[in-house]
Amino acid sequence: MSLSAALFLFICFVGRRHMHELPIEVIEQHVVKQSGGAYRIPKGALPSVNLVVAATSNEDYSWAKKDLKVPGMVVIPYIADNTSAPYHPQMNKGHEAMMYHQYFYDFYDKLPDISILVHSQSHSWHVDQLLDQSMIFSLNHLDLREVQQRQFLNLRVTWGFGCMAGAINTTRANEESGVLPEQKEMQEAFRANFNLYDIPEILATPCCSQIAVTKERILSVPKEQYKHHIDWLLHTPLEDSISGRTWEHMWQYLFLQKAIDCPLEHKAYCRLYHICFGGREQYDEYIELQQGAQKLDQELLRIKQLEGNWEAHRKEKEEAAKKNGEKDDEIKGTIEVEQKANNKMKLRLQEELDSIREAIRVRKEIAVVRGAVEVNRIAEGEDLYGDDWEPSADKAFLKEEDKTKVVTSTSTVR
Ligand SMILES: *[C@@H]1O[C@H](CO)[C@@H](O)[C@H](O)[C@H]1NC(C)=O
Ligand SMILES: *[C@@H]1O[C@H](CO)[C@@H](O)[C@H](O)[C@H]1NC(C)=O
């Protein structure tokens, strides 16, 4: 405890010292503070923001109006299955992709500076664990200036679905692919949507289609093209869930013309949500702690389940022992010993889990304090897509032969 308190003070002190060395306009960029999050605004006028919520009529999105602290944010609900709703797609088809395209089309001539497009759930696994799987936490901590800088970004940061595992290989068009049912359809979907024959081999971006994009980027695509995407979703013979999912892998291409868009996780957390662990190593340590906690949790659950079924377990043991000809009090003795050992194990695991959870909590708190200081964010967030020390996702996907090609071609130039 005292160690973390000391660290906290150290960071505040170092942070403050650096703050004074920063030009005043940089400090002034970050004046708005609210209880629900450390909300930051760029210098100058507030960017106008639309929050587009893709919902069905029975989904509750009232959190978007109640719990968000982003000043001036306007909520635009698109209702999939109600053509009397003020905003709705032509048809309930293609999931959120249809509604996002309909929004780009409908609002093309009256866009705000930033449009954020999300699902109707306030909490879901679609949002990263570090962000409490909460869209409310995410948006209340979102740095709009970062959105303005990057122009388009995925609100999800981790690579687990969509960037490494779950990236699409478009050449696998004839293979069954249970985990990624949309993979074998991607080649056709990409061709049909972008009228391209030569399509990228790998499409990679964090999963789940919750994105933020600037007015400039939306306008960089002709209005008629959104209509084209809507028509594709309307007429494709693909199942609804599949056609919607193909778009998870295409937004980065639509807005950035990039097939692979996977910023490094710790840098992205730091720049976008102001949660800064201090570097790759510290971030990896945090992830390891989290994985450790998950393992302990499972182990503990197993023991608790055994405890819940103890009577049945005891009877089973007794009968087996009797068959082996053991004496009654001997049997009782062994079972008692087992129960005691289990109990001890449970207490030990619980203690260990509590202390890991505390370590996780403290580390995250310190990361939030570190992230509140601009210089810390600048230091950690530089080279968002990687450098010599931390390779980018693009490099990871380059095949051996391509790497040699790259080397050869640069050496020829020299
Ligand atoms: C459809 O939208 C209209 C207009 O907002 C509303 O009055 C109506 O109750 C909605 N219908 C359903 C089934 O939610
Ligand atoms: C994509 O899939 C093809 C066919 O399975 C394979 O040969 C190729 O190496 C894959 N590409 C990458 C970059 O993994």
Image: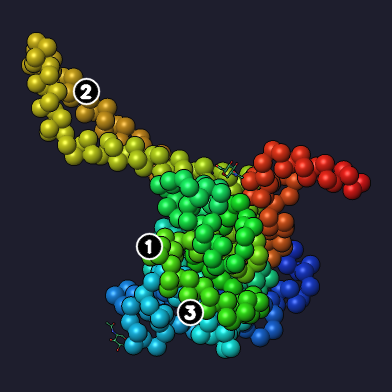
The residue carrying mark 3 is 102
How many C-alpha atoms fall within 10 Å of the one at disc 3: few (<14), some, or many (≥20)?
many
Q: On the image, numbered disc 2 is attached to which residue?
A: 337
Residue under pointer 1: 239
Taking 362 as reference, is 378 left or right? right
Marks 1 and 2, Cα distance to the nearest angstrom? 57 Å
**Residue 233 screen position, x and y as percent:** 45, 70
Q: Amino acid at mark 1?
A: Glu
Residue 133, picture quadrant = bottom left
Tell me which corner region of the image, top left, top right, bottom left or bottom right, holds residue 342: top left
Q: Secondary structure at mark 1?
A: loop
Percent position (x, y) of residue 330? 13, 15
Single out the mark in the foreground, 1 or 3: 1
Residue at 17 percent across and 23 percent down: it is: 335
**Picture quadrant where residue 60 is located:** bottom left
Q: Residue at x 76, y 39 (%)?
A: 404
**Relative vertical location of residue 235 with respect to residue 302 in this rendering, above or below:** below
Disc 2, SS: helix
Residue drawn at x 55%, y 52% as measured from the top left: 170
Could you tell me residue 37's position as x and y percent? 52, 70
Q: CA distance from mark 3 to mark 2?
A: 66 Å
